[in-house]
Image (cartoon, rainbow, N blue to C red):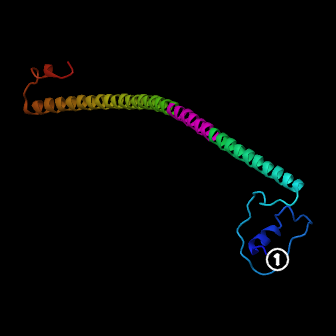
Amino acid sequence: MRPAFEDALSDSPLDPANDDGRPMEMTGTIETPAPTMSAPTAPKDPLRAAASEELQRAIEQTSDRVERWMADQRRRLGIGIDAMVASLKEQRDTELSRIEEWKVAERERAERQLAQEKERFHGQLMEELIEFEHQLGERLREQEERLAKWWDEAEQLTKQRFADFGLSTSSGANDSPKA
C-alpha cells in the first residue's frame, strides 16, 4: 500500500499522468506539500516522461527569459531614470540661468527707471525753484516799489514838517536812496 501523500500527488490535477481533462475529486482532508515542478519520481510512460522533461526545459527557458527580460527592464528603467534626472538637472540649470538673466535685466530696468525718475524729479524741483525765484523776484520788485513810494512819502512829510517849522531841507534832499 502507498502512503496517502503519494496518492494525493499522483492524482493531482498538476500531474501529467492525469490528463483526462477533469479535476480529480479528493475525499478526505489530507494536507499535502505544495507541488513542485520537478519530474515525477517514477514515470509511467517514457513518452510522458519525455514530454514532462521537455515541459520542464521549456519552463526553465521561459523562467530564464523572464529573468533576463526583468533584468533588462530594470536596466532600462535605471537608464531612463538617469536620463530623466539628467534632463531635469539640465532644465533646472536652464531655468536658473533664465531667472538670473531676468534678474539682471530687471535690475538694469529698475536702475534706468530710477535714474529717469530722479531726472524727472530734479527737473520738476528745478522748475519749481525757478518759478519760486521768479515769484520772489516779483515780490522783491513790488517791495522795492512800495519802499520807494514810502521813501518819497516820508521825504514829502519831512519837507512839509520842516517847512511848517520854517527850516530848510536843502542839504537832506540829495540823500535820497533813488540816486
Q: Give the x, y percent position of residue 179.
A: 20, 18
Q: Amino acid at mark 1?
A: Met
Residue 162 in the image: above or below residue 35: above
Q: Position of residue 123 (x, y in %)?
A: 41, 28
| Residue at the spot of label 1 | 26
* 144 vs 51, nearest the viewer: 51
**Up-down: is 50 above or below 153?**
below
Extent of the magenta region: 80-100
What's the residue at 71%, 75% (across, down)? 31
Please indicate whether residue 30 sits to the left or right of residue 126 in the image: right
- Taking depth in this image into account, of 13 and 65 the one nearest to the observer is 13
Q: Residue at x 52, y 35 (%)?
A: 96
Pick out the residue farthest to the bottom. Answer: 28
Question: Residue at point 21% right, 28% down?
Answer: 152
- Residue 49 at x, y percent in the picture: 84, 55
Image quarter of residue 27: bottom right
Q: Nearer the viewer, residue 143 or 116?
A: 116
Q: Magenta-highlighted stretch: main secondary structure?
A: helix
68 relative position to 135: left or right: right
In screen coordinates, is 116 left or right of 58? left
